Amino acid sequence: MKRRHDRIIVAGGGPVGAVAALILAQQGIPVTVLERGEGVTLDYRASTIHPPTLDLLEKCGAAQAMVEMGLICPIMQYRDRRRGKIAEFDLTCLKNDTRHPYRLQCEQFKLVGWAYPRLQEIPGVELLFGHDVINVEQSEDEIVVTAATRDGERQFKGDFLIAADGGRSTVRKLLDIDFEGFTYPEHFLVAGTRYDFKQQMPDICSVNYTADPDEWYLLLEIPDMWRIIMPVEPLIEPDDAMQEKYLQATLHNLLPRPEPYEIVVKAIYRVSQRVAANYGGPRVFLAGDAAHINNPLGGMGLNGGLHDALSLTDRLARVWHGTADERLLAGYEKQRKPEAVNAINAMTQRNKRLLEERDPEIRDRMLAEWARIAADPALTYEHLLETSMITSLRRSGMLP
Ligand SMILES: Cc1cc2nc3c(=O)[nH]c(=O)nc-3n(C[C@H](O)[C@H](O)[C@H](O)COP(=O)(O)OP(=O)(O)OC[C@H]3O[C@@H](n4cnc5c(N)ncnc54)[C@H](O)[C@@H]3O)c2cc1C
């Protein structure tokens, strides 16, 4: 494939764009990252990183950095709001399948904050903040990207473009690629508190999925706080749900205590299940949330996005260095889109259905099934291979 500019452009310096750029730059490929924001965004979405993602990120150094910054959580629980602990799983049983047999809790902004300075010290890298991508033209031998900056519009020319500009991807819209799926009517609230829930709930572990027909929740311990993710009814305005009074009432409803909770983080998100109709090509490729978005139950969106980045950069680097021809790039969508549909989207939708199930009979069956899986080592092993995304990566050929 002809190269006119000797440069790959990355639209969006979120976790997927930053890691993709770093992997390319570490292989001697000049990269320009165009990021709309003015630096690291304090983004309270992803914190769960799965075992094989860490295995695959060792090569670029990100795994070791995240392990240092994060909290290692080998145990996870499925709970019921009224009945308490239903099933407990120990990821150490994956020790022969991964070098990281645990979930790591490390917020996505820490990964971005680690990647930016590494990028900036590699010759040939441009990391440009305040650059909002507004147009893309793709021709046979180049791509031309226009970014709006505070000093006016600027044009950037390159050989390939990675669109890692998030769920509302401008690039995906400019390419007129459908984003097929649906948006949930309720919002998802994230609240972080320094209160240690283990004081009053001694049997919980660091990762707890709690089912309830009215108000399921996810309780996660992260390095310096506990994080709660729960739905907010569609009738409640997102701004109202972010008020201290609502947040206190919600947390006290979850676990009453005499004192108010110290709430140090709050955010509210609209959540969708969507996958792009195609992943682009021949010179522009979607990755991460630009290609697929899903609910956070199972912690798969960013993990899947990082798997996209790993697949795409490996292909681009091989084509770039002449060890493979451009047909390798067509394999990117073939490898990654089925996993977005059949693994990431399917599993996260299933997780939400299970947590919020209202039919008492189905609920009983589901809770009994969780307990059955946890009591049987062979079923536990299969379950953990699937929920930690090892099965998906093996099926797609990204892991042996
Ligand atoms: C409540 C919640 C919890 C979650 N928890 C998890 C979890 O535990 N584990 C997990 O795997 N996933 C989780 N996710 C999903 C995860 O947050 C996303 O999948 C992840 O942020 C995707 O990364 P990205 O880099 O593709 O996109 P983003 O993080 O959205 O980054 C996109 C970047 O592009 C920039 N940008 C956007 N438009 C432009 C433009 N036109 N020009 C230039 N720059 C642009 C943005 O400023 C941003 O920096 C969660 C999601 C939610 C809502």
Image (tube, grey):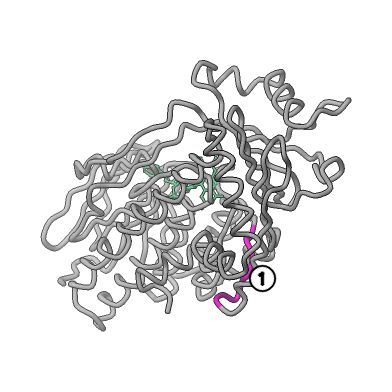
Magenta span main SS: loop
x, y percent for residue 349: 44, 44
- Asked whether residue 168 is drawn in magenta, I would say no
Identify which residue, 225 or 17, lies in the foreground: 225
Location of residue 334 (image quadrant): bottom left
- Asked whether residue 98 is drawn in magenta, I would say yes
| Name of the residue lying farthest toward the bottom | 323
- Magenta stretch, residue numbers: 97-104
x, y percent for residue 243: 66, 20
**Residue at (18, 61) in percent of width and height:** 282
**Residue at (88, 25) in percent of width and height:** 258
Q: Callout 1: 10 Å neighbours few (<14), some, many (20+)?
A: some
| Name of the residue lying farthest toward the front | 361
Q: Is residue 296 left or right of residue 12?
A: right
| Residue 189 in sight here | no
| Residue 278 in sight here | yes
To which residue does mark 1 refer?
Answer: 92
Q: Is residue 305 left or right of residue 78?
A: left
x, y percent for residue 163: 32, 52
- In this view, 99 is above or below 136: below
Identify which residue, 162 or 72, lies in the foreground: 72
Quarter of the figure with the C terminus: bottom left
**Residue at (53, 62) in percent of width and height:** 383
Q: Is residue 10 left or right of residue 295?
A: left
- In this view, 105 is above or below 352: below
